[in-house]
Image: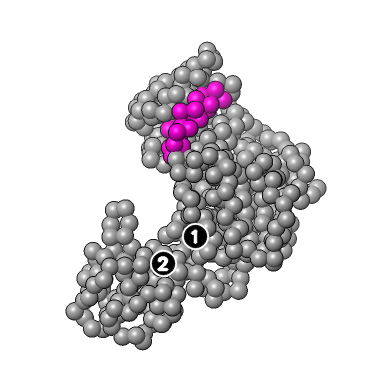
């Protein structure tokens, strides 16, 4: 519930017309779904501009609007608040609402594994608390505020994934969310088009700590050189670390793949099992374990939550495919996650071939060529039997993978063509990994395989 005065104070806006008194129950940016008791924020997006639907939402009974274009409507009952930027105003209202609640807010970021880690943390905390989390990948300047605006008195924890593709994104999200706990997965080659270098990626991600205080805690991967460097520095907040190789607060030991399919490892003398054979997921699990311990979730519940964890669709999800397997990692790709996915394909037990369908990794800027070539060299050193590349940049992987004469290599530009090659080479019992950036639509290849595995 928000009063008009609260909205104006939170956003620094000005009342253009209508009553200065009144209340709304919630906030909406969707003109198709907005309800009469809600505040409508007129957001200008890449495709639609909410200002074009002002008349429509008023007809639906909306009586309070926030806009960044000066306008008036005939209905005197409608209160219109003018702000400089409605996207910023959405964050301002979300920050105001978040500060009404004295509960832990956990925010996490990194170059890869964010969504899986967020879901693992939420699963661990849900063993003891009522948890709010951002759904899917609503991790940007729209999704994070909308998630915070769903906060209700019954919630005891908030888990927020925070993403970025340009300088300034993370500090803005940190300002809106004001996290109590900041978690970092890893730092690597992601969004280099605008962040330029890995150091630039680190500097952008680390700004998640901008609003922490002495009672706050940072949880980080001590095996990551950029993140580990912060352990040697003095900070105003507390720190907790996790790792596989380096010494840390929560170190995984005795790591092995069980039955060619499951990860099995020990932490603090306790045996843990994950429904994955990708070692990168141990780091995700250690993040969740660290957070759970910090927030007093019993270890036995943490172990149960991680053992029963189901990986999100398109994010390292391992599915039965006849007598073999499909690793559906189609949601997105950068060099960090591509290397992790390749490791999973190498580890999984299969009676037949290992097939890698690899598409372009986008938003890598001037380093795109070198990074695709490096991925090709990594594939050449692997136990992959068949490589199918999709896209102009992924073709560079093929040239280097061909140096390994044992690998059968196909190149194409579109997902449809990849399906044709798969139809020729796939046999029941094969393990197939499908990976690529979002715009490459690799989920179509996964759907094709699942529809006709024979």
Q: Secondary structure at mark 1?
A: helix
Q: In the rendered structure, find residue 172 and report the number of the disc placed on it.
A: 1
Q: Position of residue 244 (x, y in %)?
A: 72, 41
The image's colouring method is one colour
Reading the image, the residue beneath label 2 is: 90
Residue 321 drawn above or below residue 212: above
Query: Does residue 54 appear to the left or right of 420 in the view shown?
Result: left
Where residue 60 sits, quadrant-wise, is: bottom left
- Is residue 355 highlighted in magenta? yes
Q: Secondary structure at mark 2?
A: helix
The magenta span reads 353-378
User: Image point 66% across, 65% down: which residue?
Assistant: 213
Q: Is residue 454 visible?
A: no
Q: Position of residue 35 (x, y in %)?
A: 32, 73
Q: Residue furthest left?
A: 74
Q: Nearer the viewer, residue 409 or 146?
A: 146
Q: Nearer the viewer, residue 43 or 331?
A: 43
Q: Nearer the viewer, mark 2 or mark 1?
A: 1
User: Image point 42% across, 72% down: which residue?
Assistant: 11
User: Which image quarter is the C terminus in?
Assistant: top left
N-terminal of the pair, mark 2 or mark 1, is 2
Q: Is residue 287 visible?
A: yes
- Is residue 444 highlighted in magenta? no
Q: Position of residue 215 (x, y in %)?
A: 69, 66
């Amino acid at each position: 519930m928000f009063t008009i005065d609260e909205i104006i104070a939170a956003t620094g806006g000005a009342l253009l017309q209508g009553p200065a008194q009144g209340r709304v129950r919630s906030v909406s940016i969707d003109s198709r779904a907005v309800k009469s008791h809600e505040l409508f924020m007129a957001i200008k997006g890449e495709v639609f501009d909410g200002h074009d639907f002002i008349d429509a939402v008023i007809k639906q009974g909306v009586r309070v609007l926030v806009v960044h274009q000066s306008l008036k409507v005939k209905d005197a009952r409608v209160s219109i608040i003018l702000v400089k930027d409605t996207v910023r105003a959405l964050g301002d209202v979300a920050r105001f609402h978040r500060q009404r609640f004295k509960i832990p807010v956990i925010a996490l970021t990194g170059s890869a594994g964010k969504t899986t880690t967020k879901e693992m943390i939420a699963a661990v905390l849900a063993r003891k608390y009522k948890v709010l989390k951002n759904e899917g990948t609503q991790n940007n300047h729209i999704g994070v505020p909308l998630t915070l605006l769903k906060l209700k008195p019954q919630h005891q924890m908030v888990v927020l994934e925070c993403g970025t593709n340009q300088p300034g994104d993370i500090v803005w999200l940190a300002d809106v969310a004001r996290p109590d706990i900041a978690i970092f997965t890893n730092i690597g080659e992601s969004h280099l088009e605008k962040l330029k270098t890995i150091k630039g990626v680190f500097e952008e991600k680390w700004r998640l700590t901008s609003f922490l205080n002495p009672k706050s805690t940072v949880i980080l991967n001590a095996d990551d050189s950029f993140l580990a460097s912060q352990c040697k520095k003095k900070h105003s907040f507390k720190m907790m670390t996790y790792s596989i190789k380096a010494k840390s607060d929560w170190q995984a030991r005795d790591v092995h793949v069980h039955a060619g399919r499951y990860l099995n490892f020990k932490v603090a003398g306790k045996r843990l099992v994950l429904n994955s054979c990708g070692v990168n997921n141990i780091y995700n699990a250690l993040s969740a374990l660290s957070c759970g311990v910090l927030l007093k979730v019993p270890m036995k519940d943490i172990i149960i939550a991680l053992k029963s964890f189901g990986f999100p669709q398109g994010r390292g999800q391992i599915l039965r495919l006849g007598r073999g397997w499909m690793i559906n990692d189609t949601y997105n790709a950068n060099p960090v996650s591509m290397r992790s996915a390749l490791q999973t394909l190498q580890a999984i037990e299969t009676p037949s071939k290992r097939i890698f369908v690899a598409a372009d990794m986008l938003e890598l800027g001037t380093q795109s060529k070198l990074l695709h070539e490096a991925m090709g060299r990594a594939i050449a050193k692997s136990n992959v039997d068949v490589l199918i590349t999709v896209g102009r940049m992924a073709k560079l992987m093929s040239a280097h993978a061909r140096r390994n004469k044992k690998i059968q290599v196909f190149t194409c530009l579109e997902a449809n063509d990849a399906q044709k090659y798969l139809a020729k080479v796939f046999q029941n019992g094969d393990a197939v990994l499908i990976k690529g950036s979002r715009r490459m639509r690799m989920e179509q290849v996964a759907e094709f395989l699942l529809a006709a595995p024979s």
